[in-house]
Image (spheres, helix red, strand yellow):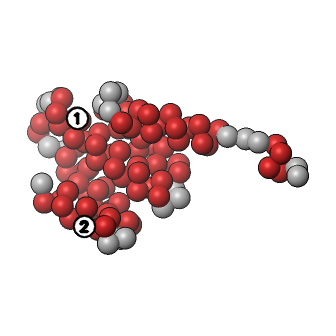
Amino acid sequence: MCESRNIDQLIASGHLAGAVKLLGETIAGAMNGEEFKAGDEQARRNVADLYFRRGKLYWRLGERSRATNDYARASELDPDGPATMALELARDVESFFNPDLYNP
């Protein structure tokens, strides 16, 4: 897959926003594909992987809400994939509260 190679190159060169954009375009194309529309399990896992990768990039960019949304979508598509654990961890981070941090 040529897009995957381009995405990896953008990430390696530090162009995370460009990689996010290309992942978004790739997700849109994959979701409009006949295999995904027909309910092909491998196509669903591939799209879930794309959402998971984009979620990781959003997390690195500090866009926690978008990352969590992508992890949730990936988890819906592939409940046994790595996004399920990432979603759980992201929710743990978001719900962390320590009153001592605010009242020294």
Q: Position of residue 36 (x, y in %)?
A: 17, 36
Determine whether label 2 and label 1 are within 8 Å by CB. Answer: no
Residue 39 lies, with reference to residue 94, above or below; the image says above
Q: Earlier in the sequence, mark 2 or mark 1?
A: 2
Distance Cα–Cα, label 2 vs label 1: 24 Å
SS at mark 2?
A: helix
Q: Position of residue 17 (x, y in %)?
A: 38, 66
What number is the disc on residue 20? Answer: none
Residue topped by disc 2: 9
Q: Residue at x 12, y 54 (%)?
A: 1
The residue type indicated by label 1 comes to Arg
Residue 52 lies, with reference to residue 3, above or below; the image says above
Residue 31: quadrant of the picture: top left
Residue topped by disc 1: 44
Judge left or right: residue 48 versus residue 88. Answer: left
Q: Residue at x 44, y 55 (%)?
A: 58
Judge left or right: residue 54 versus residue 69. Answer: left
Q: Residue at x 36, y 52 (%)?
A: 54
Judge left or right: residue 85 versus residue 40. Answer: right
Residue 38 lies, with reference to residue 14, above or below; the image says above
- Residue furthest to the right in view is 104
The residue type indicated by label 2 comes to Gln
Q: Position of residue 60 (x, y in %)?
A: 47, 58
